[in-house]
């Protein structure tokens, strides 16, 4: 399958973009500490039926490093990519984790530029903070494990805390969007242990989606028996859901 690449210059950052396939356009946005290469299996499956655009956020994959890593900075990266594509019709945004949150915020601010949203294990309007004081030591250690690229452990930690705050306010963004929304969520975002923080986090994850559906009954929620790595471990199932939703 033929793909083409381009480099988008934005805010002092070079963002690598890849596009290929044919059909309805999809833009696939990765999450924190993930790259377009990580989403390769899902991308190739979706390109059988769609023209799929992928890219790397600043400081990730083949994108250059930046002097700031904030939610608004990443949101600017998504907007810059969409502004350079010159697609014939508005795309469906498919966002994973942080990428889902970026997709919701972009669609709320620019509703005419998107045809719909598919949100994979992110953008959850949680009814209470995901990270409590008891979680911070664990989350700081997780950030150290993820700090394998330009982003430092402190930057990843700060972003995680910021994303938690963003999700506390994201329900208002959903109410501004008049496009179809599909969610594909993990049943065990924190793993399937019955001990420690996992049970609370998993209950909270489902409660957030239930909160959204109560406000927006038109939102379609699909649950996969997986943890937060579902985009890597369950790519065929995710592709089938997306294909069924978009081709019906």
Image (spheres, rainbow, N blue to C red):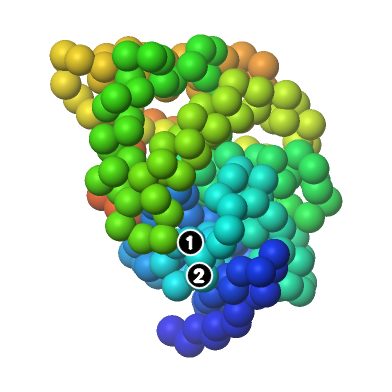
Image quarter of residue 143: top left
Frontmost residue, 232 versus 240: 232
Q: On screen, 117 above or below 19?
A: above
**Vertical comparison of 140 with 213: above or below:** below
Residue 217 left/right relative to 96: right
Give the quadrant of residue 182: top right
Q: Residue at x 32, y 30 (%)?
A: 139
Which quadrant does the N terminus fall into? bottom left
Figure check: 56 above or below 231:
below
Q: Secondary structure at mark 1?
A: loop
Identify the residue at image location x=49%, y=30%. Answer: 161
* Distance from Cα at disc 2 to Cα at disc 1: 6 Å
x and y percent of residue 166 in the render?
60, 30
Residue 133 in the image: state x and y as whole percent: 38, 14
Residue 59, disc: 1
Q: Nearer the viewer, residue 228 or 9?
A: 9
Q: Which residue is mark 2?
A: 63
In what element is the residue under mark 2? loop
Image spot of residue 181 (x, y percent): 62, 38
* Quarter of the rendering containing residue 222: top left
Q: Is residue 63 left or right of residue 176?
A: left
Which residue is nearer to you in this view: 35 or 138?
A: 138
Q: Residues within 10 Å of mark 2 (few under 14, many from 20)?
A: many
């Amino acid at each position: 399958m033929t793909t083409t690449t381009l480099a988008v210059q934005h805010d002092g950052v070079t963002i690598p973009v890849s596009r290929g396939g044919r059909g309805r356009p999809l833009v696939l946005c990765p999450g924190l500490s993930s790259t377009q290469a990580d989403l390769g299996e899902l991308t190739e499956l979706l390109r059988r039926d769609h023209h799929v655009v992928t890219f790397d956020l600043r400081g990730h994959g083949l994108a250059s490093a930046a002097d700031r890593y904030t939610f608004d900075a990443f949101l600017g990266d998504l907007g810059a990519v969409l502004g350079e594509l010159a697609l014939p019709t508005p795309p469906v945004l498919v966002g994973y984790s942080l990428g889902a949150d970026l997709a919701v915020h972009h669609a709320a601010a620019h509703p005419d530029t998107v045809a719909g949203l598919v949100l994979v294990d992110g953008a959850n309007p949680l009814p209470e903070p995901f990270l409590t004081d008891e979680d911070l030591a664990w989350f700081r250690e997780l950030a150290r494990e993820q700090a394998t690229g330009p982003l430092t452990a402190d930057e990843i930690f700060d972003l995680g805390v910021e994303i938690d705050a963003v999700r506390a306010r994201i329900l208002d963004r959903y109410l501004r969007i008049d496009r179809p929304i599909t969610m594909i969520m993990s049943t065990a975002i924190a793993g399937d242990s019955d001990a420690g923080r996992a049970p609370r986090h998993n209950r909270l994850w489902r409660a957030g989606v239930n909160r959204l559906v109560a406000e927006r009954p038109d939102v379609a929620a699909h649950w996969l028996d997986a943890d937060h790595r579902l985009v890597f471990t369950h790519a065929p199932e995710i592709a089938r859901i997306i294909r069924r939703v978009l081709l019906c």
